[in-house]
Image (cartoon, grey):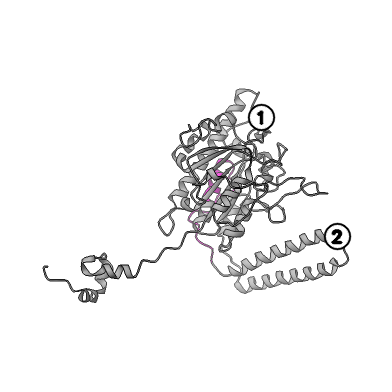
Amino acid sequence: MNAPQNRRGFLRTGTALIALPVLESLGFRRFASAAPAPVAAARPKRMVFLGFGWGVTEQSWFPDVAQKGAGYTLPSGLAPLARHKSDFTIVQGLVNKDVSGGHTGSTFWLTGANEFGAPGQSFHNTISADQIAADSLGKATRFDSLVLDCGAAANASGHGQGLSLSWDARGKPMSGPKTPVEAFHRLFAQETTPIEVQKTMLRQRRSVLDNARESARELQRQLGKTDNAKLDEYFQSIRDIETRLSRDERWLGAPRPAPGLPEPKPSLAGYEEIALMYDIMIAALRTDSTRVLSYRQPVSTLLTSLDVRIDAHTMSHYLGKGPEYLEASEKRDRAQSELLAGLLDKLKSTQEPDGSSLFDHTTVVYGSNIRTGHTLDSCPTLLAGRGAGLRLGQNLVVAKDTPLCNAWLTLLRGSGVAVERHGDSTGVIPHLLA
């Protein structure tokens, strides 16, 4: 035991070398410093946008504006989130200045667009924040983004025109799965069509696109300025389809990952539906199927599942009505906070390959375009997750008329998305950054 140790002799026992730590007394100090350990690759950034209609209960959801910073009292509407209080920030005072209708809902929530901003058009929208993120963060995944919806419940849930939460570069609404069953199959159902048949189908689709493009170019020479502008949109839609076909080709033959949860039962609605959609989101992020998700979640069916018999729209106008309307609104807030708390629990407990958690690399946006009733002057905004380098655990009250898009710009840049501006943004929110 007292014999001097010989480094060369020690290295002969290769199996022992793997099991033992690096011991400086055996001459490993110089060896270790000459060959530093490789640095682990940075984990990808993710972004999740959760939108709900009809706003919140003003008196019991927003913290006291006088209690700024970390020492604020958590209001009862957010009480189920108490265990996460240091890991999310409430931002008060954000507005979508060009949104004037109390029923426009989530249509412009992520875009900040002026509905009448295009001359000669009765409706106009622009790209949403999640799709800007998808263009940057979604290049390496099977799905650049996943757009989740609540189907027929959209209008009754305060989502405006009932189109979408997500809008593409042309300002067109994007569709997506409307139930947990649809979302599950979109992400995890294995392809049963033979590879050669899939290749043939892709070639046929490309051929159709080529023919359509050539026919449109021949027509273009005969059109006036207005019609040519419409044709430009047509060409952009063809390019969008080509992009999706290229992605399908890259993933051709690659098996879908195991979801780690059973296939959902059909006909779920309200509370259970939202909870299962959140579980599917976690599975999508954990398997790196996508890095950007948006979910336009239901409110009307949530109320039904909570045994609330007041319809969602009437409930949102609880001011001046009987106490049962206020009680229904507060019950909705608490249920939504419970569901969000469960999602944050799972983000924190889902481990990444480097030992960190999904929460460490994900930004969660949770809010509504309406404060309450038809009031639009302070969009409820809760931001969680460490993916964008945010200053968490705060009650942040911004200056009057601060654009909601300033928050989206801050999150996008913090997540590594190179974007100069978004919607009607005027700059980032400095106090939101760590």
Give the Cα separation between the discs numbered 1 and 2: 47 Å
- For mark 1, give the secondary structure: loop
In this view, the residue in front, 434 or 216, is 434
The magenta-colored residue range is: 255-280
Locate residue 239, reporting x and y percent.
71, 65
Q: Is residue 372 above or below residue 215?
A: above
Residue 225: which numbered mark, if any? Answer: 2
Residue 195 seen anywhere in this rendered image of the structure: yes
- Under mark 1, the amino acid is His
Circle 2 packing at 10 Å, graded few (<14), some (14-19), many (20+), is: few
Q: Is residue 366 left or right of residue 216?
A: left
Foreground residue, 97 or 105?
97
Q: Position of residue 289 (x, y in %)?
A: 54, 59
Task: Measuring from the top left, give residue 334's x and y in whole percent.
Answer: 53, 35
In this rendering, the answer to whether 240 lies above or below 343 is below
Q: Secondary structure at mark 2?
A: helix
Q: Are marks 1 and 2 in contact (CB under 8 Å)?
A: no
Q: Which mark is residue 45?
A: none
Image height check: is 173 above or below 155?
Answer: below
**Residue topped by disc 1:** 317
Q: Amino acid at mark 2?
A: Lys
Q: Quadrant of residue 5?
A: bottom left
Taking the magenta stretch, the answer to whether it contains residue 260 is: yes
What residue is rendered at 78% in x and 49% in y? 118
| Quarter containing the N terminus | bottom left
